[in-house]
Image (spheres, grey):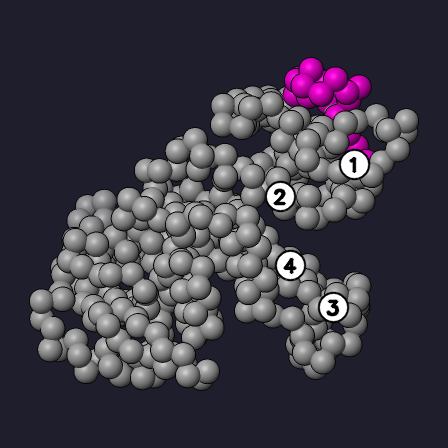
Amino acid sequence: MRAASAEQERLLGILLGTVHQFFGDVGALFSGVEDPRNPNKTDYPLGALAFAGVLMFPLRLQPRRQVGLLLRTGAGVETFKALFGSSNFPHGDTLDHGFSRLDPQDIRAVVSSLPRRLILKKSLDQFRLLGKYFVLAGDGTGTLSFPKRHCCHCLTRKHNGKIIYYHSVLEAKLVAPNGLALSVMTQFVENPGPNPTKQDCELKAFYRLTDNLKASFPRLPIVLTLDGLYANGSVFDLCRKHGWGFIIALKDKDLPSVNEEFASLSPLQPENRLTWITGKNKEIRQDFRWVEGISYTDSFDREHCLSVIECLETKPNTQGKQETTKFKWATNLKVTRSNAAALANQRGRIRWKIENKGFNA
């Protein structure tokens, strides 16, 4: 128990130092959130509650009961008291009561403000793609599931003949090759009522999220890296209207006319080839080929001009045998010998970091 307390104190010190260096006063981070509580009946300022909630994640706490067991004792409490002038670390039930009354839009604004501050400070300039674009990965994940309806906004699906009620969320994260994954915006996937004509879905949530993203970052140069779900004309058109780039995973079964034209034109363009050796011990070989200027007409008769990059990656498996895996992406960015490997490795393939660094960790 003493070792756990010491580790928590160490983590708290690191987190506070990092937050102070990049964002200033901890309590001021949540100054824009409207506090609906009666000020005469509150023991903790809103900033203290919000920061306590944040701490539950780096400390890997799950039930609210763990807050009382692990965070209301030890030297870390004294640090918390000094920061916020509170009598103690708030109880888990206090956190729940406070958070349940906040406007989610206010919290989303706080989340979006953090990467904005880093961008303004030029702290993230080293991660710009082609020296210009910030790369945002988008992906959805499940959050909760229930055997019975949880609320009127539940999504539903059938599993083994039974109806499952669940909630999902779509995240946009700023990602970088070094593993950095910063939440920029969140959009919940939820039905408007208990019996909708059509359920909400990740794609619908994506369109809502991108509208909010453009409103919050109107001039930010962005490249979206997305999975194959988003390989469609509506997403291409949205990126064109917003002035964004995109790098979207492309499967052989997706966009048949684009894949067919890529297969036909690539043999005629031997100059669009690159072999790249990478890995810690130079054990990975990547053979790239690409085709630019592929025309695609979507189901709404909108014309799009795409480039397609293919990578055949060969590396030893766990048994030491060589295995080859194919990756392919559609993009509206110009592809050259000097940037093909970077577009694929540092931008196209880092989309998975949103899951490993954002959802799993």
Residue hosting label 1: 35
Choose top left, top right, bottom left or bottom right for residue 272. Answer: bottom left
Q: In this orientation, does residue 15 appear?
A: yes
Magenta range: 73-94
Is any atom of residue 141 visible in this view?
no
The tag earlier along the polypeptide, 1 or 2, is 1
Which is more toward the observer, 71 or 334?
A: 334
Relative height, residue 92 to residue 19 (above, below) = below
Residue for point 71% across, 21% down: 84
Q: CA distance from mark 3 to mark 2?
A: 22 Å
Asked if residue 161 is positioned above or below residue 130 in the image, the reply reads: below
**Residue type, numbered disc 1:** Asp
Q: Amino acid at mark 4?
A: Phe
Residue 178 sits inside the magenta stretch? no
Picture quadrant where residue 336 is located = bottom left
Q: Secondary structure at mark 4?
A: strand
